Amino acid sequence: MAMTTTPNIEGKRIVKYCGIVTGEAILGANVFKDLFAGVRNIIGGRSATHERELQKARGIAMQEIQERAALLGANAVVGIDLDYEVLGAGNGMLMVSASGTAVVTQ
């Protein structure tokens, strides 16, 4: 299934709009992972742990919109928007939401 942030797919024609599809993923952060990530942030550099969690959450949200688009009979999702939020007491949870328009292309 083609998935893009653009409103169309080059070389393809949208023949049917099936509707808006959304996907969400909320992941809790492990206390020990956070501790070591905090140390890394103090020392400098990137936090591989947080990057992996972001990638995991984004993958889940994208998989959900793909599955929901398929249920609507779509073969592509266009106009995908990704949003990231930190939730919970002490910002202990990460939410990634994805939304787009399910379409049929030829």
Image (cartoon, rainbow, N blue to C red):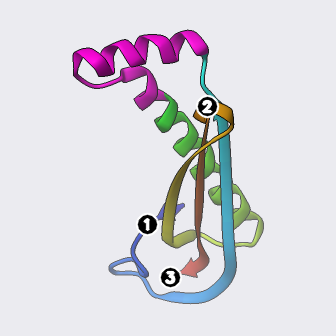
Crowding near the residue tagged with mark 3, few <14, some 14–19, many ≥20 C-alpha atoms within 10 Å: few
Q: Is residue 87 above or below residue 65?
A: above
User: Is residue 2 visible to the viewer in this orientation of the structure?
Assistant: yes
Image quarter for residue 12?
Answer: bottom left
Q: Position of residue 4 (x, y in %)?
A: 43, 66
Q: Residue 92: in sight, yes or no?
A: no
- Which residue is label 3 attached to? 106
Q: Secondary structure at mark 3?
A: loop
> Depth check: 74 or 43 in front?
43
Q: Residues within 10 Å of mark 2 (few under 14, many from 20)?
A: few
Which residue is denoted by mark 1 in the rendering? Answer: 4
Asked if residue 78 lies left or right of residue 91, the reply is left
Q: CA distance from mark 2 to mark 3?
A: 48 Å
Distance in Å between CA atoms under marks 2 and 1: 34 Å
Q: Residue at x 69, y 81 (%)?
A: 18
Magenta part, dominant SS: helix
Q: Is residue 43 above or below residue 22?
A: above
In the picture, residue 66 is in which quadrant? bottom right
